[in-house]
Image: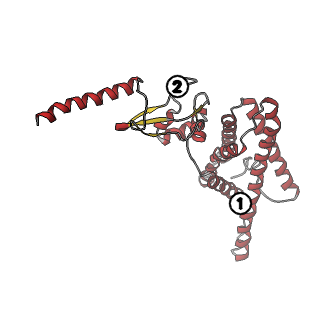
Amino acid sequence: MEDDGERHPHLESSQATLQALVGSGGVPPITSFSVRAAAASGPGQYRCIECDQEASELYRDYSHGVLRITICKSCQKPVDKYIEYDPVIILINAILCKAQAYRHILFNTKINMHGKLCIFCLLCDAYLRWWQLQDSNQSPDPDDFIRYAKEWDFYRLFTVASLEQAAFFVGIFTFLWVERPITEKKKPNFVLLLKALLLSSYGKLLLIPAVIWEHDYTPLCLRLIKLFVLTSNFQAIRVTLNVNRKLSFLAILSGSLLESAMVYFFQRVEWDVGSDCAIYRSQDF
């Protein structure tokens, strides 16, 4: 019992010394015994949310549950402070279009919901078009054929919304493909850019509440939703490719022009649809 009592203070002193070294930054050389897990699996896997420099890890997990956030070698700030934040705070910062929040989501997290989010946004867009079409062509006939035709109208509008979305993305990619070689030799990562554009289009989910809670200000709300989606796409391009605001704005403008051309084509072939460009116009609700 006396031996145990003598060894116990020594053990507490060793643990206190380890905590002090970790807290002050004077951590001794790391070995496989002292480090349980690291946040990196390869160099350049992550990005600093402040300066956009590559980082090999976000944090280190030492023994006894001691965590330490990695400091960026370029800006001397934490590589990603958002790993300690609640997801709600991250979402709010993303809604505010903060570049740091976008870098955290795009580079330092593993999100595999791009396809599902794209389909759901297109369904919301198609539903709004279908709702506007039915509101302008109301028929009191409850015949099954009429209901069947209305169902196919929804499928047709979903196809139109998909084509217009594709035209918007193709316009952006085409502009960046032509412009980027002039300024830099490195080609843009179109796969990552596509994922960023799909994720930044989450604002289209607000279309459904805008239709459900119908109000005199609904046309204004629809315009604001469209502006918010374009602003989010603008920030996604700027963060993903690390380009200036002018280039991002021109890319969004190119995509919008090609999308407008697609809308004009559908109007010429007399498809009675509410396009994504004209969907936010003033209407009598």
Give above or below for 114 relative to 18: below
Quadrant where the N terminus is found in the figure: top left
Measured as percent of width and height from the top left, residue 194 is found at 70, 46
Q: Secondary structure at mark 2?
A: loop
Kind of residue at disc 2: Lys
CA neighbours of label 2 inside 10 A, class few (<14), some (14 to 19), many (20+): some
Alpha carbon of mark 2 to alpha carbon of mark 1: how far?
49 Å
> Of residues 1 and 203, which is closer to you in this image?
1
| Tag 2–tag 1 contact (CB < 8 Å) | no
Give above or below for 154 relative to 8: below
Give above or below for 207 relative to 63: below
Q: Residue at x 29, y 31 (%)?
A: 15
**In this figure, which residue is indicated by the disc labeled 1?**
130
Horizontally, residue 249 falls left or right of residue 81, namely right
CA neighbours of label 1 inside 10 A, class few (<14), some (14 to 19), many (20+): many
Q: Which mark is residue 77?
A: 2
> Of residues 122 and 133, which is closer to you in this image?
122
> Of residues 268 and 247, which is closer to you in this image?
247
* Extreme-bottom residue of the structure: 144
Kind of residue at disc 1: Trp
Horizontally, residue 104 falls left or right of residue 61, namely right
Measured as percent of width and height from the top left, residue 65 is found at 36, 38
* Extreme-left residue of the structure: 2
Q: Which mark is residue 114?
A: none
Q: Secondary structure at mark 1?
A: helix
Measured as percent of width and height from the top left, residue 278 is found at 77, 48
Give above or below for 212 relative to 137: above
* Extreme-right residue of the structure: 268
Q: Residue at x 70, y 76 (%)?
A: 144
The image's colour scheme reads: secondary structure
In the figure, residue 162 lies in which quadrant? bottom right
Measured as percent of width and height from the top left, residue 150 is found at 72, 68
